[in-house]
């Protein structure tokens, strides 16, 4: 298990909803012992934020600006390859030795990449490691799924990347070996801005090819009813906003 991945994901789990808001409510409860009304206000704020982020309307508010960047990004020149980013593995069974398979988000990315390959005949690079637990790296699972499920052969496979920044760094090394510097980048629309920033920092020009969108086209009354799926989407979008902030800070430190 990758220690950096473990620390980063533990911190994210503590900061992002729902745990971050549960901790905020706990702080309010402690404050209420000495400052009753202030503590109650903090608890009420945490509860209202949790309810808001659990609605489709709240998730849309967070995700839509990110997804719009994925479809309005300007680009020039002709792409030379297709890069597909991994999005996690899933285990086929309860036993620890049960085989791994690509996750659902990864499968959608592979589908988009395969369709793009059929349209352009460009070579494909898949990238993803195994940072969360032992098992077959995601890159190998992706290459196998691409061939088995979509009858498309991956030209290159990176099976070491533990996060988006490493996806970009390791993929760029493979691409530059073949004098390739401009690619179609396949990932979720909400993840695209951060992925584009990582690849551009690695010296690769990106043309976005978003695979899935989580922001709904139109809202209805049902969009204001809390659901687990909406909270999951809000969590994903907030994770990307925090990631973009961190990239901006780290970029400033480098510059």
Image: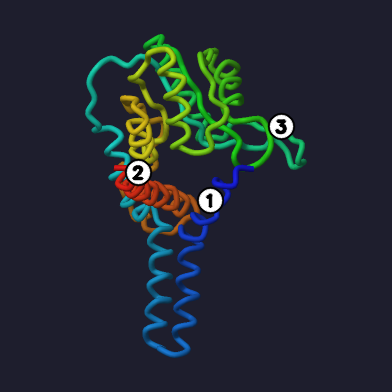
Crowding at label 2, few (<14), some or many (≥20) Cα neighbours within 10 Å? some
Question: Is disc 1 in contact with disc 3, using a CB cutoff of under 8 Å?
Answer: no
Q: CA distance from mark 2 to mark 3?
A: 34 Å
SS category of the residue bearing label 1? helix
As drawn, the label of residue 99 is 3
Q: Earlier in the sequence, mark 1 or mark 2?
A: 1
Q: CA distance from mark 1 to mark 2?
A: 27 Å
Q: Quadrant of the C terminus?
A: top left
Crowding at label 1, few (<14), some or many (≥20) Cα neighbours within 10 Å? few
Q: Residue at x 71, y 32 (%)?
A: 99
Given residues 160 and 229, the one toward you in this image is 160
Question: Residue 64: horizontal and vertical position, in percent?
Answer: 30, 45
Please determine whether, in this image, residue 23 is positioned above or below residue 251.
below
Q: Earlier in the sequence, mark 2 or mark 3?
A: 3
Q: Residue at x 46, y 17 (%)?
A: 124
Crowding at label 3, few (<14), some or many (≥20) Cα neighbours within 10 Å? few
Question: Residue 138: horizontal and vertical position, in percent?
Answer: 58, 30
- Mark 1 or mark 3, which is nearer to you? 1
Q: Residue at x 37, y 11 (%)?
A: 120
Q: Label 2: which residue?
A: 216
Q: Label 1: which residue?
A: 9
Colour scheme employed for the rendering of this structure: rainbow
Q: Which residue is most to the top?
A: 121
SS category of the residue bearing label 2? loop
Q: CA distance from mark 1 to mark 3?
A: 23 Å
Q: Is residue 216 left or right of residue 103?
A: left
Please determine whether, in this image, residue 241 is positioned above or below residue 209.
below
């Amino acid at each position: 298990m990758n220690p950096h991945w473990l620390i980063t994901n533990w911190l994210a789990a503590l900061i992002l909803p729902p745990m971050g808001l549960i901790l905020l409510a706990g702080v309010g409860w402690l404050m209420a012992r000495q400052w009753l009304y202030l503590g109650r206000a903090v608890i009420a704020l945490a509860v209202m934020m949790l309810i808001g982020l659990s609605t489709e309307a709240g998730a849309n508010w967070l995700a839509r600006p990110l997804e719009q960047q994925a479809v309005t990004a300007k680009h020039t020149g002709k792409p030379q390859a297709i890069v597909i980013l991994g999005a996690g593995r899933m285990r086929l069974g309860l036993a620890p030795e049960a085989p791994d398979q690509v996750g659902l988000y990864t499968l959608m990315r592979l589908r988009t990449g395969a369709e793009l390959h059929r349209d352009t005949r460009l070579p494909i690079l898949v990238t993803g490691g195994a940072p969360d637990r032992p098992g077959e790296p995601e890159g190998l699972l992706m290459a196998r799924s691409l061939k088995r499920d979509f009858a498309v052969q991956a030209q290159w496979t990176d099976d070491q990347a533990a996060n988006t920044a490493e996806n970009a760094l390791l993929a760029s090394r493979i691409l530059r070996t073949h004098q390739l510097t401009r690619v179609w980048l396949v990932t979720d629309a909400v993840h695209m801005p951060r992925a584009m920033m990582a690849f551009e920092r690695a010296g690769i020009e990106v043309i976005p090819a978003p695979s899935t969108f989580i922001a709904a086209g139109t809202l209805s009354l049902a969009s204001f009813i809390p659901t687990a799926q909406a909270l999951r989407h809000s969590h994903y979008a907030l994770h990307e906003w925090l990631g973009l902030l961190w990239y901006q800070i780290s970029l400033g430190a480098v510059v």
